[in-house]
Amino acid sequence: MDKKIVKAKGAPAPVGPYNQAVVIGNLVYTAGQIPLDPVSGQMVGANAGEQAQQVLKNLKAILEAAGSSLPKVVKTTVFLKDLNDFNAMNEVYAKFFDAATAPARSTIQVARLPKDSLVEIEAVAVL
């Protein structure tokens, strides 16, 4: 199978040697997204809820550039610097994913995220 690299103009450029997403067959694998503004490249949001909003906007742009969309996401992994931010992140997450068709999800507390982000989310979606 051929591997297609996704480069979305509406999402921030990678901060390292990786791509925003890769398409293999009918699946899209996104890189973890942090709350970077796609134009300025600067961090957005003072709290986990605000940061989750930007992260999900970035994921949406990447999925659409790949030919997919948020409703086609089958699995997400959410990385939180502090699990005490779970409810704040979840409130925002619910605005992007309908509860009846929401993807499977893992949520993990981590010691540190790139650029000291409070939230990072990666996704797998179908085309």
Image: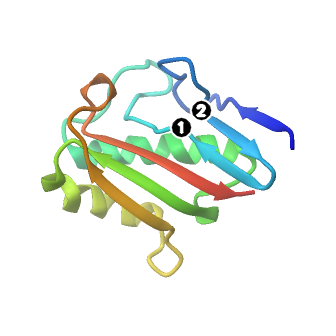
Query: For numbered disc 2, what is the local secondary structure?
Result: loop
Report the amino acid beneath label 1: Ala
| Residue at the right extreme of this rendering | 1
Nearer to us in this view, 113 or 13: 113
- Answer with left or right where residue 105 lies relative to residue 59: left
Neighbourhood count class around disc 1 (C-alpha, 10 Å): few under 14, some 14–19, many 20 upward? some
- Answer with left or right where residue 101 lies relative to residue 25: left
Query: For numbered disc 1, what is the local secondary structure?
Result: loop
Nearer to us in this view, 16 or 67: 16
2 and 1 marks in contact (CB < 8 Å) = yes
Question: Mark 1 — residue?
Answer: 31
First reached walking from the N terminus: tag 2 or tag 1: 2
Residue 2 x/y as whole percent: 86, 39
Residue 54 x/y as whole percent: 40, 41
Report the amino acid beneath label 2: Gln
For image coordinates 56% across by 18% down, the residue present is 17
Question: Mark 2 — residue?
Answer: 20
Residue 71 x/y as whole percent: 60, 65
Image quadrant in which you'd find residue 124 = bottom right
Q: Is residue 4 above or below residue 100?
A: above
Residue 86 x/y as whole percent: 22, 58
Where does the C terminus fall, quadrant-wise?
bottom right
- Answer with left or right where residue 124 lies relative to residue 89: right
For image coordinates 50% across by 27% down, the residue present is 38
